[in-house]
Image (cartoon, rainbow, N blue to C red):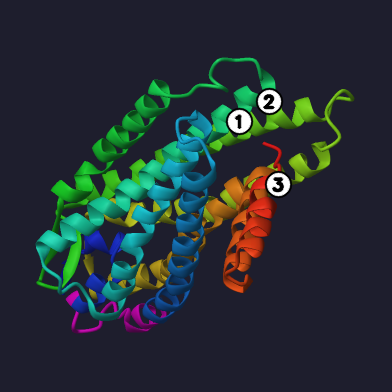
Amino acid sequence: MDVYATSTLDTTLDPYYYSSTYEDEVCDKTSLVQFGAIFTLVFLSIVVILSLFGNILMIVILAKYENLKSLTNSLILNLAVSDIFFTAGLPFWAYYHMYGWNLGEAACKTINFVFYVGFYSSGVLLILMTAHRYVAVMNPLSDIVSTTGFYSVLASVIIWATSILISSPAYIFTKVIDQNHCVYTNSYWSLFGIYQQNIVFMVSALVFTFCYSQIICRLLRPTARRRKNKTLKLIFTLMVVFFVGWAPYNIVIFLRSFYVWEQQPLDSKDLVAVCETQRPLDYAFYVSRIFAFSHCCLNPVFYVFVGVKFKNHLKKMLKSRVHRTTSIPCRQNRLTITSITSGEEFSI
């Protein structure tokens, strides 16, 4: 029996499609699909809950206490919106791994598009936020650091326009195959999607490495501020989390892309050998993808809530909430509450 490895071109992103195509179990991936379904459902559920909570809280704090015309706050707000877009697609992928795709082609295209808009806009924003932090440390008097108003709006428009453009192939070139699989239409676009993610990661990694290494060198100077130890720990943590989260995932999808390139006919024995070679990579794909996708719930923690300003805003909001629920509704208490909440001063 001769079969083609390219007949499974979309298995790079959808092993469920692979296993259901070969009913004779020449390349059976039933155990892999079951592992992926359970593993994906449990961990993505945790990621979705934490991401929605953290990013919505971030938006509330920004809207209530911060100037949204500031470039810094505009980038943080856009990052929160981006992570929510990304998170919105995760429950559908968990459902997909459990039951296959039975939501129709329009939903297949739309959810793919929204997911990748969130994915790529998050990458673009992290690059810009890293570059902005670099300028703020290396040249704190630069106009870029204190930019407000029109330029913040312009930056937001460019970010989203770029992300929509990059994500458009996910809408145009995906379709439902065999009434149960939401995949790219051919191997070319499957490879394009993989290498596009690899390029975004490599650009992000270069920007991260250059900017943060320069910041660390500046902070290690004897004239640096006293808070440099905390800042250095934060920067080191950011870099470790970024590379641990995204490097394994990008390496795995890059290695899996080689199977899409293979176009020579294979007999059943050779196909079984290829399947056994792919199996560890398939398991690695499921695990590494969870680490990468969990970045959307870690962004609020590392980019916002570790800062003094936002921690104080959060304390202020919680304190105001506690006073509102525990106070007796009389004039004296209301005046006391107002004095406490409005009289506090927070450093920015």
Q: Could you tell me if the residues under marks 2 and 1 are in contact, i.e. CB atoms within 8 Å?
A: yes
Amino acid type, residue under disc 3 in the picture: Glu
Camera sees residue 245: yes
Q: Can you name the residue that lies furthest to the right here?
A: 222
Q: CA distance from mark 2 to mark 1?
A: 6 Å
Q: Can you name the residue that lies furthest to the top here?
A: 142
The label shown at residue 137 is 2
Res. 157 image quadrant: top left
Task: Name the residue located 18 percent from the left edge and 49 percent from the top edge.
Answer: 171
Q: Secondary structure at mark 3?
A: loop
Q: Which residues are magenta?
A: 21-35
Q: CA distance from mark 3 to mark 1?
A: 28 Å
Q: CA distance from mark 3 to mark 2?
A: 28 Å
Expressed as whole percent of the image width and height from the top left, the position of residue 284 reads 48, 66
Q: Secondary structure at mark 2?
A: helix
Camera sees residue 262: no
The label shown at residue 344 is 3
How crowded is the residue under tag 1: few (<14 C-alpha within 10 Å), some, or many (20+)?
Answer: some
- Quadrant where the image shows the C terminus: top right
How crowded is the residue under tag 3: few (<14 C-alpha within 10 Å), some, or many (20+)?
Answer: few
Expressed as whole percent of the image width and height from the top left, the position of residue 138 reads 68, 21
Which residue position is annotated with label 1? 133
Q: Could you tell me if the residues under marks 3 and 2 are in contact, i.e. CB atoms within 8 Å?
A: no
Expressed as whole percent of the image width and height from the top left, the position of residue 345 reads 71, 42
- Quadrant where the image shows the N terminus: bottom left
Amino acid type, residue under disc 2 in the picture: Val
